[in-house]
Amino acid sequence: MRVAIIDYGSGNLRSAAKAFERVAADVPSASILVTTDPEIVRRADRLVLPGVGAFGDCRAGLAALPGMIEAMTEAVLQRGRPFLGICVGMQLLATWGREHGDHPGLGWIPGEVVALRPSDLRLKIPHMGWNGLIFPSKRHPVLAGVAQGETAYFVHSYHFAGAPDWIVAEVEHGETLAAVIAKDTVVGTQFHPEKSQETGLRVISNFLTWTP
């Protein structure tokens, strides 16, 4: 099983790769490859898109790799390869990002990425640190074994706003926010699994063994 972690200049790749390598050691035949090559992405069995920074910058970085978006689209939407987006990598799944202007997303999960506006003005932005997960509906397979209220590590100033059908876990920060979104073979986490200790490693393990 070939797992491609897409390198498009967004940063945070090393810690993500190390977390996946740690989990993959217990998954027979799994190999982790950080790549900028769309052909490797097209042939991969699973895809991971990390992301740190502003939506527009990350979108531009992805578009700057010739053929990458087309390879991702073919692998995920046509061949049904499982896909995990992390933080801004999750936000890029939306139709639009509204951070410092309007930027088109991949449009794989309908919604838009908008600024955090907590009702309690004492709450800081960015939303940064550990926060408990809330499950509003049936548990998604990638969240198997994660308990209600179990904490994950967040760092973000914008969030995914979309139909409840796509939101499979939430978090509270002055308002209810999407923590995990999912549609078909695509899943995204607003939190950083690679920084979320045992919770994050469980999510990664579930993703590597998930059969949509």
Image (tube, rainbow, N blue to C red):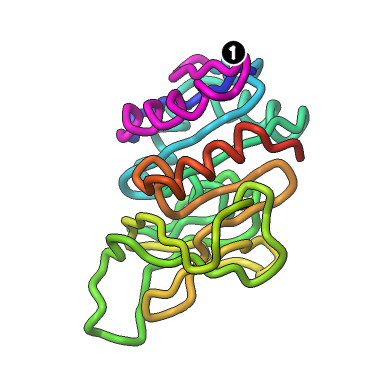
Q: Is residue 101 visible?
A: yes
* Label 1 CA crowd tier, 10 Å (few <14, some 14–19, many 20+): few
Q: Nearer the viewer, residue 114 or 35?
A: 35
Q: Nearer the viewer, residue 197 or 115?
A: 197
Q: Position of residue 189 (x, y in %)?
A: 50, 51
Q: Nearer the viewer, residue 48 or 29?
A: 29
Q: Residue at 60%, 52% (x, y): give it.
A: 145
Q: What segment is highlighted magenta in the picture?
A: 11-37
Q: Is residue 25 magenta?
A: yes
The residue under label 1 is 39
Is 176 left, or right, of 27 in this rendering?
left
What is the quadrant of the C terminus in the image? Answer: top right
Give the total of numbered labels.
Answer: 1
Q: Residue at 30%, 33% (x, y): give it.
A: 11
Q: Position of residue 190 (x, y in %)?
A: 45, 54
Q: Nearer the viewer, residue 199 or 45?
A: 199
Q: Residue at 43%, 67% (x, y): give it.
A: 132
Is 53 left, or right, of 191 in this rendering?
left
Q: Residue at 45%, 32% (x, y): give it.
A: 62
Determine whether 166 is above or below 202 in the image: below
Q: Amino acid at mark 1?
A: Glu
Q: Is residue 181 magenta?
A: no
**Secondary structure state at the residue bearing disc 1:** helix
Q: Is residue 70 visible?
A: no
Determine whether 84 is above or below 26 in the image: below
What is the quadrant of the N terminus in the image? Answer: top right
Q: Quadrant of residue 3?
A: top right
Q: Position of residue 192 (x, y in %)?
A: 40, 47
Determine whether 66 is above or below 180 in the image: above
Q: Quadrant of residue 152?
A: bottom left
Is 96 left, or right, of 73 in this rendering?
left
Q: Quadrant of residue 12?
A: top left
